[in-house]
Amino acid sequence: MEPGEGHKLSEVIEKTIDLPVLPATAQKVLGQMNDPDVSIEKIKKIISTDPGLATKILKVANSAFYGGYSNIQNLTQAILRLGLNAVRNIVVATSMKNVYKRFGLAEKLLWEQMIGSALASCLIAKSTRAADPEDAFIGGLLHDVGKVVLNNEFQEDFAKVMERVYNEGTPYAEAEKEHFDFTQRQVGASLVKKWGFPESIEQMLNTFDNQEDLSKDRGLTNLVAIVKLSDKLCQKYGVGWRKAYEDEVDFGNLPETIGIDEDDMEDILEKVQELFKEEIDLY
């Protein structure tokens, strides 16, 4: 690639790059979630074919985050406690590692940031009621999923982008423009459509960085503000980053946007910090 010449979205299409495919079990769960006749029994049957995933669902259901004060020992009870949307989200979250072509340090940081953002977004949504917690979880998990494709297919150039971000503090969007003529959000929107997620997730990705479009939909405004705040919390505590940035992180007007005052923010900071310590390893 010549200096200053960025990869174009048309190039991605012309080269017919295979977008990542979720594992079979996750695909089946997503397919069932789009079926009006979805039931706990149908989802249980799919998950039961994957012992590792079934064990993961039970562990998450018994975690403090989901109110695991009484021990659950079977999938039916776990699904009842979590709810179908949460089960879908956990299945997708635990499948994300399989989407990477490689899994070195860069991939580990990306994955941790995705899981961290998902968990923090869910917690903030629960605390503020500014969005549905499970919508916030999947929004946090998938808002940067286009980075996985860029890392898979353009590893060298994506590494240069992330070096600018990690080593020089350059905003990701600015560094991305130096190597790509499209955004990771555009790629992510194509990916979630392929995976069969609701159109609302694709819409979130397409409007994530467009304040004018976001302002037309209060629900989307709240959801995006929650996810952006979660990203900053990941940076503050070093989740998906090479170090914790602590007081260097500026939340801007994000707390105010979703109705969080100073006392509420202190409570959220404490809960998120504990959440990161206890829950990320479950995935």
Image (cartoon, grey):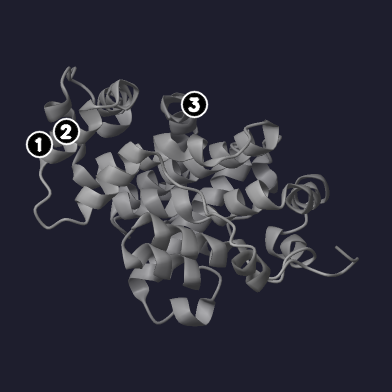
Q: Is residue 119 above or below residue 251?
A: above
Report which residue position mark 1 lands on. Answer: 41
Picture coordinates of residue 157 (x, y %)?
A: 78, 53
Residue type beneath disc 1: Glu
Residue type beneath disc 2: Lys
Question: Of all residues shown, which one is farthest toward the right?
Answer: 3
| Residue at image point 54% right, 54% down | 18
Nearest to the observer: residue 4 or residue 209: 4
| Residue at image point 57% right, 40% down | 100
Left or right of residue 75: residue 245: right
Under circle 1, the secondary element is helix
| Residue at image point 41% right, 59% down | 194
Q: Is residue 193 above or below residue 157?
A: below
Q: Is residue 132 above or below residue 11?
A: above
Label 3 environment density (alpha carbons within 10 Å; few <14, some 14–19, many ≥20): few
Report which residue position mark 3 lands on. Answer: 277
The answer to which image quadrant residue 61 occupies is top left
Under circle 2, the secondary element is helix
